[in-house]
Image: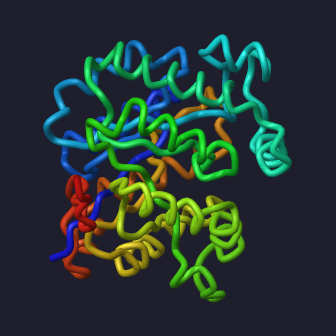
Amino acid sequence: MKSITLCADDYGQNTAISQAILALLQEKRLSATSCMTNTPFWSTQAAWLKPLKEQADIGLHINLTQGYALSSAWIAREGTSFPSLFTLLKKSYLRQLDKTAVLGELHAQLDQFIRELGRMPDFIDGHQHVHQLPVIRDTLLTFYHERLRPHACYVRCLDNSKTWLQIKEEAYIKRVIIQLCGANTFKQQLVKNKIPHNASFSGIYNFAHASCYSKLFPSFLQQSRAGGLIMCHPGLENSHTTDEIAKSRVKEYEYFQSEEFLEACQIHQVAIGRFVNIYPIAS
């Protein structure tokens, strides 16, 4: 069987998301979660994860597009609140993002993670995949060498060079955009810098198709290599939220709680487990 990391993003974004992820982690239907540390919920909800630190990978979900900044460096140069993803994309490609601001915010969000969990993250990735964008990815490498390398944290790699042009696959345009926004370049940087990363990446789909998630997920299992990572976004029902994908989260949660999910893993000979680095990193 091939071992795949199944990672739920956005832990700490709100209570409905965190409770869903926690339940799935406890039942060992997930093997990792990625945490947003700049939210008002983080301090309380971080404590819920502590009993699971030996059971699952717990990572830092770098957030530069939702909510408010933690660092004085970002606030001084970019403002108190984060920009939209579109604005961040534009500023990163025009090289208008201030590296000092980005680096300061990375340090601040990591410090919040450590303050509440008392440990370094097992991995690092980005909310809306911002960690692979120009300026941000170069700053992240600097940050990794400063803070994370001694702890052998792995970094999420989004590269799907071998499959991204398969037009018939779900969410083709979305996959192309993610690939063109630096996925291959960032992978090359990870390899060059000998930074642990996942062997494959899947889980991309059109959230409008969430009602078909049970039919989509087996294809993610099939696409994954040993040492690969599948991202997901489960959540409980939440009528008091502005979260645009709240309904999709419920569909994902229901699927992961089902026997159908377990059967799909068995059919595709997949074991859901913690990250295994198949690219040995020389010391």
What is the quadrant of residue 74 in the picture? Answer: top right
Closest to the observer, 170 or 153 = 153
Closest to the observer, 277 or 216 = 277
Q: Above or below — where is 63 with respect to 71?
A: below
Closest to the observer, 85 or 276 = 276
Q: Above or below — where is 130 with respect to 78?
A: below
Closest to the observer, 229 or 72 = 72
What is the quadrant of residue 96 in the picture? Answer: top right
Q: Residue at x 75, y 15 (%)?
A: 80
x and y percent of residue 259 in the render? 24, 64
Indicate left or right for 105 with 145 as reference: right
Farthest-out residue, front: 283
x and y percent of residue 146 in the render? 42, 31
Q: Above or below — where is 39 with respect to 223?
A: above
Indicate left or right for 244 with 124 as reference: right
Q: Residue at x 59, y 24 (%)?
A: 105
Q: Residue at x 62, y 26 (%)?
A: 240
Indicate left or right for 49 with 10 as reference: left
Q: Quadrant of the N terminus?
A: bottom left
